Image (cartoon, helix red, strand yellow):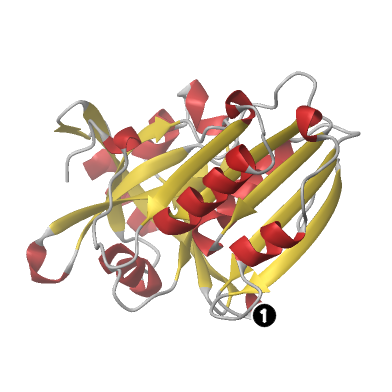
């Protein structure tokens, strides 16, 4: 670990200013292939140790903006959910879905222990278990999987939960842990029925008044599901949270939550 000692001495106290949000230098401490389509990086170092002192880091589905130097020397930033916080080791875990055209995803797929990047945040992921919730519905594509896992691991018991997740492949499914009673459904990207069709097939819940819905993923998907649960289920608006993480055909999609993060 001599490389880490030398790196720590160079990075100690280093905070990179960026608009309205500070960037903290992070070091890749470990890498792991969670499944064929998902790679996990464990990020640490002095910058991350300071970063996790922020109370918002541990909130379910909290996210950060990660900045890497891509090919050509251009610094590129993208938003990613914090999968896990290890305060004892001073690390955070971040999962990356593999795809050919994402510069940060490509960087993560090739990252090695000792590589560095910077991060800014955190920002809340929109999940707070509301009073009176008896049935929680979590819906998302692969980009929302880390957030859904983080939410499930934070839940109390007893609580009835339905989680519906779209995966790149069947091999990307995994066991999820929760104290609640979770009914987990996987659908495969590009196959039918998809996420929207599956939710439509559920009909209108009888107990919608005690239902809470959290959904995230591709912008078109989020819009369609939001319209359905508000217009057909008649779910009260305050019991729904929908977050678009990305949009088909748009390389650097930004939602309003991204304001203050500069690339």
Residue under pointer 1? 170
Residue 134 rendering spot, x and y as whole percentages: 84, 31
Residue at the far top: name it: 131
Residue 164 rendering spot, x and y as whole percentages: 69, 58
The quadrant the N terminus occupies is bottom left
Residue at 51% over, 41% down: 242
Residue 123 appears in which quarter of the rendering? Answer: top left
Horizontal relation, residue 198 to residue 67: left or right: right
Give the total of numbered labels: 1
Q: Is residue 126 above or below residue 165?
A: above
Q: Is residue 6 above or below residue 53?
A: below
Residue at 61% over, 70% down: 194
Residue 227 rendering spot, x and y as whole percentages: 53, 45
Residue at 17% over, 46% down: 263
Q: Is residue 221 above or below residue 211?
A: below
Of 233 and 12, which appears nearest the observer?
A: 233
Question: Dot 1, crowdedness within 10 Å: few (<14), some or many (≥20)?
Answer: some
Q: Is residue 55 above or below residue 151?
A: above
Residue at the far front: name it: 232
| Residue 222 seen in render | yes
Horizontal relation, residue 225 to residue 219: left or right: right
| Residue 94 seen in render | no
Residue 25 appears in which quarter of the rendering? Answer: top left
Mark 1, secondary structure of its residue:
helix
Horizontal relation, residue 135 to residue 109: left or right: right
Residue 84 rendering spot, x and y as whole percentages: 58, 45
Residue at 54% over, 63% down: 142
């Amino acid at each position: 670990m001599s490389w880490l000692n030398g790196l720590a001495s160079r990075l100690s106290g280093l905070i990179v200013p960026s608009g309205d949000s500070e960037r903290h230098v992070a070091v890749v401490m470990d890498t792991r292939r969670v499944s064929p389509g998902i790679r996990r990086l464990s990020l640490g170092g002095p910058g991350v140790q300071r970063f996790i002192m922020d109370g918002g880091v541990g909130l379910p589905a909290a996210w950060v903006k990660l900045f890497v130097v891509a090919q050509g020397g251009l610094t590129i930033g993208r938003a990613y959910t914090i999968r896990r916080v290890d305060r004892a080791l001073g690390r955070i875990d971040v999962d990356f879905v593999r795809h050919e055209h994402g510069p940060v995803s490509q960087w993560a797929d090739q990252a090695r222990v000792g590589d560095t990047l910077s991060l800014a945040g955190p920002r809340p992921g929109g999940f707070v278990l509301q009073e009176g919730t008896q049935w929680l519905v979590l819906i998302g594509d692969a980009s929302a999987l880390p957030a859904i896992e983080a939410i499930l691991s934070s839940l109390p018991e007893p609580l009835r939960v339905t989680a519906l997740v779209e995966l790149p492949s069947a091999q990307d499914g995994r066991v999820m842990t929760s104290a609640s009673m979770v009914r987990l459904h996987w659908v495969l990207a590009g196959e039918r029925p998809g996420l929207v069709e599956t939710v439509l097939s559920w009909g209108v819940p009888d107990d919608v008044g005690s239902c809470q819905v959290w959904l995230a993923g591709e912008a078109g998907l989020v819009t369609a599901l939001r319209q359905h649960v508000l217009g057909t289920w008649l779910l009260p608006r305050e019991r729904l949270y929908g977050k678009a993480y990305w949009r088909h055909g748009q390389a650097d999609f930004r939602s309003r939550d991204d304001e203050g993060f500069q690339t």
